[in-house]
Image (cartoon, coloured by chain):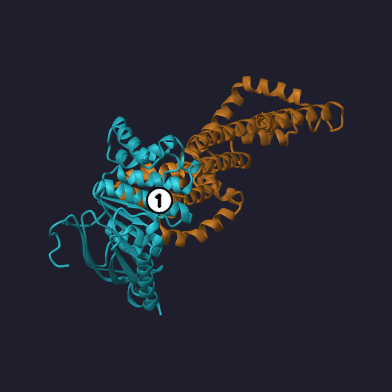
Chain colours: A orange, B cyan
Amino acid sequence: MGATVTGWLTRLAPLVFVALLAAVWETASRTGLVDPRLLPPLSEVLRVLSGLLQDERFRGDLAITLSEIAVAFAVVGPLGLAVGFFLGENLPAYRMFAPALHLLLSVPKSIFLPVFIFAFGIGFLQKVIFAVTLAFFIVVLSGVAAARSVPVGLVTAARSFGATRVQIYLHIYLPAMEPLIIEGLRMGLIFTVTGVLLAEMYGSPRGIGRVIFAWGEMFRMPELFAGVLLVVTVTIVCNELMRAVEDARKARRRGLR
Amino acid sequence: MAGAGGSGEIIAVEGVGKTYGSGEQALTALIDVSFAVREGQFITLVGPSGCGKSTLLQILAGLVPASTGRVLIDGLQVTGPSPGKVGVMFQDAWLLPWKTAVENVEFPLALRRVAAAERRKRALPLLDLVGLSSFAHRYPDELSGGMRQRVAIARCLVQEPRVLLMDEPFAALDEQTRTRMGSELLQIWETSGGTVVFVTHGLTEAIYLADTVFVMGTRPGRIIARITVPLPRPRTIDMIGSEAFGRLRNEIWHLIAEVRA
């Protein structure tokens, strides 16, 4: 009984945190504790947001950003995992590329945005390519970890039952790697969103990132916060959905020892 | 060993050697191993670590190719795993953690596309045989080490193998469980009539289980003695304390110690 109550409290904790944050935001702004010109009250921001969501132009920007994210993620997810799996399974190749991989992972890629603009312009394609570049390395490393997480003994045992190569990949590798694959995709999505928004803010004719950046320049705080709130909410919801899938699968199929 | 394929000979090992690497760094794990096993025999391979006993078993299982020589099982040369003819067990049960006990037992059949109902019908009696009928729907992480190895035994038997190859299957278990598992294995073997090759580094276990003990030495790994165990069947735990058992154990101990020195 006590465990159930604690369980519910743990689950409710994030919601309580959000509610608290909202309350602090609203009162701080209303009472003048924070300058309302810098931080407009939450209720005001929400009103602006609902107006924006009716707006044809804003919805167009939203659609562009979301499709950039979708395309970039659809490319970098499979690509990163495939490369990671290959490296994880192929020791000589891993030895050859691992140092470069870790080096490139630690390089702040946003510094190269001007280069991406020179190379690919400021359109849809450039956003996708930059986001893919940003997310690629983290997904690759997740793929490597996933491939490495498959216990050799399980594979040997399956071979002794006469499993074919395809059967081994399907019945041993895939289920064994699943938790790390989902985790890798989740990280990949976060990096993809960051990549698209960064590229839009740096230079772009359209997109949410561009719009938010412009509002900031023009000191239009209610709109700025409305945009930020929307992006943050969408990202958190996507992330939590993937985590829910991960947890549900884990509970059903148990962890590896 | 000439005349392999003669009456009742199920395993023939002919001049098998295994070398890892090449040139200066070549490591000879096994050299010129030859022996034959008659159908229905229980043999153990015993020796210190590094004597190549596990390698030899993997070669018999077709999981690792021999560098020289060849292995015949039921008259056919081993070139890869022979499911349906040979069942293999390892030191770890290697159960799929995302499958229940009964699903794990069914797994080799699932790979052969046996229908689900048929699989269940064959798996459940085997779980019963190893005393785990009430744990059929538990996951491996809910089972003890001994229980997991029982599931692995059932998973071997479901393939209806003629030969069981066991690579220190009880080595990770505590002594009591190990002895009990050994007795149960003997019971299963006596009723099923299969052939067992059992690798161990435990002298007591090697003698208690076997008709014939093959004693192996190191550097390079090879068979240094072949000892017939004169104890009657069925074996009982009490035999382990007998004088004859003790003498045999001493003899093997000295064989191994001399080669090492």
Measured as percent of width and height from the top left, residue A231 is found at 63, 32
Q: Quadrant of the N terminus of chain A?
A: top right
Q: Name above or below for residue A158 compared with residue B120.
A: below
Q: Which residue is mark 1?
A: B181
**Residue B9 appears in view:** yes
**Residue B21 appears in view:** no
Measured as percent of width and height from the top left, residue A95 is found at 46, 62
Q: Residue at x 34, y 44 (%)?
A: B155
Q: Name above or below for residue B28 compared with residue A183.
A: below
Mark 1 residue type: Met
Number of numbered tags placed on the structure image: 1
Q: Residue at x 59, y 38 (%)?
A: A204
Q: Residue at x 35, y 62 (%)?
A: B207
Dot 1, crowdedness within 10 Å: few (<14), some or many (≥20)?
A: many
> Which of A100/A171 is in front?
A171
Residue B228's image quarter?
bottom left
Q: Could you tell whether B221 is left or right of B145 in the image? A: left
Measured as percent of width and height from the top left, residue B29 is found at 34, 70
Q: Secondary structure at mark 1?
A: helix
Q: Residue at x 43, y 54 (%)?
A: B178
> Which of A60/B111 is in front?
B111
Dot 1 falls on which chain? B
Q: Could you tell whether A150 is left or right of A134 in the image? A: left
Q: Could you tell whether B24 is left or right of A30 in the image? A: left
